[in-house]
Image (cartoon, rainbow, N blue to C red):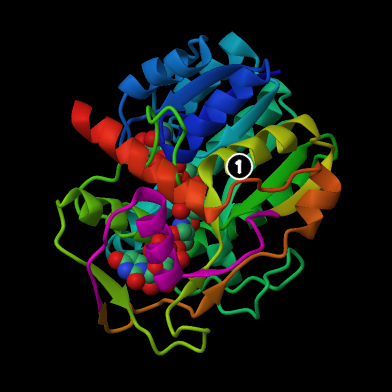
């Protein structure tokens, strides 16, 4: 299949391009580089031996997207492009609503116009809010904690409504849990700008010595060691989940959790990182971070049963690969 991958030079998108190419699909990347670099295209080519087509373009630009669709006639779209910083979405909500909703609507419109029937959307476990764990696809959504989460729930709604009146359309909503790690080559991975918001990239910055210590946001949650529990998933497993989703797409709306089904606490992740990489991560317990929930992990049975996909890589591998990427990437930039 020929897959149009928006956000394909970003963290999850780049790993998915690698897995698509490794599985003999062709790839066209559209990315405006607001949070990634064009050099990633070359790195994807180094890993796979195949260079994807790349357009530096904005997915909210209808005329450019129209041109790309009519030129290449893709079989499907995987829509990763989006803004994702939760805190920033509270500060500048309009930018988040505009970018994340408009890009989805423009792409969907072009799918209908050009007869593209497969649409895979990057959703997030954040849509479950404070439901009871493990999160199940059938649960009522409660994304009300921040505008970022709202954009994901709204896009899911838009895609679902449009699919209902276009029965030939296949919409797959993939709810990612906490993607971490990197490709084993160390050539692609997560490289956030500035001080990282998320735990794993913060840990790698502390390991590198760029940040002095990790602040552990609260140890008084109702969890086994009091720190927050999350379902960390290796980004390559996540990428493989996308290949399974694209290959099995059928008309209608399909929702899948992509996680491991296992919860890991902040302290457990620190220990795993230290053991996997044989180094020490200085940390200090601080106040809880506003908006955090105690526990977030997936029920993964639906993806296993319907897509035949399960995550294979464990926390040790996630920590090892995240650190390898940091060392290789940091040596080059
Ligand atoms: P990322 O920032 O690394 O990648 C997103 C890419 O989209 C970037 O390369 C950016 O330049 C591009 N982009 C943004 N707006 C665009 C636009 N209008 N037109 C073209 N390109 C645009 O983020 P990621 O971690 O790879 O996340 C990919 C998707 O998965 C996002 O939609 C995100 O919300 C979602 N998601 C991410 C996580 C996570 O923890 N990383 C969890 C759940 C869901
Ligand atoms: C993980 C755990 C923190 C940083 C976010 C988004 C979510 C999704 C994935 C996009 C929590 C603790 C963190 C630190 C810490 N993204 N922590 N010190 O918040 O689960 O999810 O990324 O869809 O929408 O909200 O991930 O990595 O920020 O936090 O103690 O410096 O680590 O409190 O328990 P989160 P995270």
The image position of residue 306, as x and y in percent, is: 84, 47
Using the image, determine if residue 33 lies above or below residue 293.
above
Q: Bin the neighbour count of mark 1 within 10 Å (Cα to Cα): few under 14, some 14-19, many 20 and up.
A: many
The image position of residue 241, as x and y in percent, is: 67, 41
Horizontally, residue 24 falls left or right of residue 319, namely right
Q: Quadrant of ligand 1?
A: top left
The image position of residue 148, as x and y in percent, is: 44, 60
Residue 82 visible somewhere in the drawing:
no
Horizontally, residue 222 falls left or right of residue 238, namely left
Residue depicted at 54% across the width and 26% down the height: 17
Q: Is mark 1 within 8 Å of ligand 1?
A: no
Tell me the quadrant of the picture where the N terminus can be found. top right
Residue 229 colored in magenta in the image? no
Which residues fall within the magenta stretch? 257-284
Q: What SS does tag 1 mark?
A: helix
Identify the residue position indicated by label 1 in the image: 237
Q: Quadrant of residue 73?
A: top right
Using the image, determine if residue 138 lies above or below residue 74.
below
Residue 73 visible somewhere in the drawing:
yes
């Amino acid at each position: 299949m020929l897959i149009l991958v928006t956000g394909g030079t970003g963290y999850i998108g780049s790993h998915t391009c690698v897995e698509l190419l490794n599985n003999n699909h062709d790839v066209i990347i559209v990315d405006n580089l607001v949070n990634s670099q064009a050099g990633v295209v070359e790195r994807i080519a180094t890993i796979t031996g195949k260079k994807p087509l790349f357009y530096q373009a904005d997915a909210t630009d209808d005329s450019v997207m129209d041109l790309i669709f009519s030129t290449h006639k893709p079989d499907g779209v995987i829509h990763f492009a989006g803004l994702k910083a939760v805190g920033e979405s509270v500060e500048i909500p309009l930018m988040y609503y505009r970018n994340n909703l408009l890009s989805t609507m423009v792409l969907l419109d072009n799918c209908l116009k050009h007869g593209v029937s497969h649409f895979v959307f990057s959703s997030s476990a954040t849509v479950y809010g404070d439901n009871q764990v493990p999160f199940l696809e059938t649960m009522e959504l409660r994304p009300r904690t921040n505008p970022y989460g709202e954009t994901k729930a709204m896009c899911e709604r838009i895609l679902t409504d449009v699919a209902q009146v276009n029965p030939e359309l296949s919409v797959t909503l993939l709810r990612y849990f906490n993607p971490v790690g990197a490709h084993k080559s160390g050539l692609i991975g997560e490289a956030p700008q500035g001080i990282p918001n998320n735990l794993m990239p913060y840990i790698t910055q502390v390991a590198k010595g760029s940040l002095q210590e990790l602040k552990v946001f609260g140890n008084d949650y109702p969890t086994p060691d009091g720190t927050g529990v999350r379902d960390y998933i290796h980004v390559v497993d996540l990428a493989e989940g996308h290949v399974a989703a694209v290959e099995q797409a059928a008309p209608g709306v399909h929702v899948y959790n992509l996680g491991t089904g296992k919860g890991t606490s902040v302290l457990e992740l620190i220990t795993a990182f230290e053991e996997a990489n044989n180094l020490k991560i200085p940390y200090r317990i601080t106040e809880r971070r506003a908006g955090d929930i105690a526990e977030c992990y997936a029920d993964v049975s639906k993806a296993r049963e319907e897509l035949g996909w399960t995550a294979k890589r464990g926390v040790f591998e996630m920590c090892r690969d995240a650190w390898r990427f940091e060392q290789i990437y940091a040596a080059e930039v």
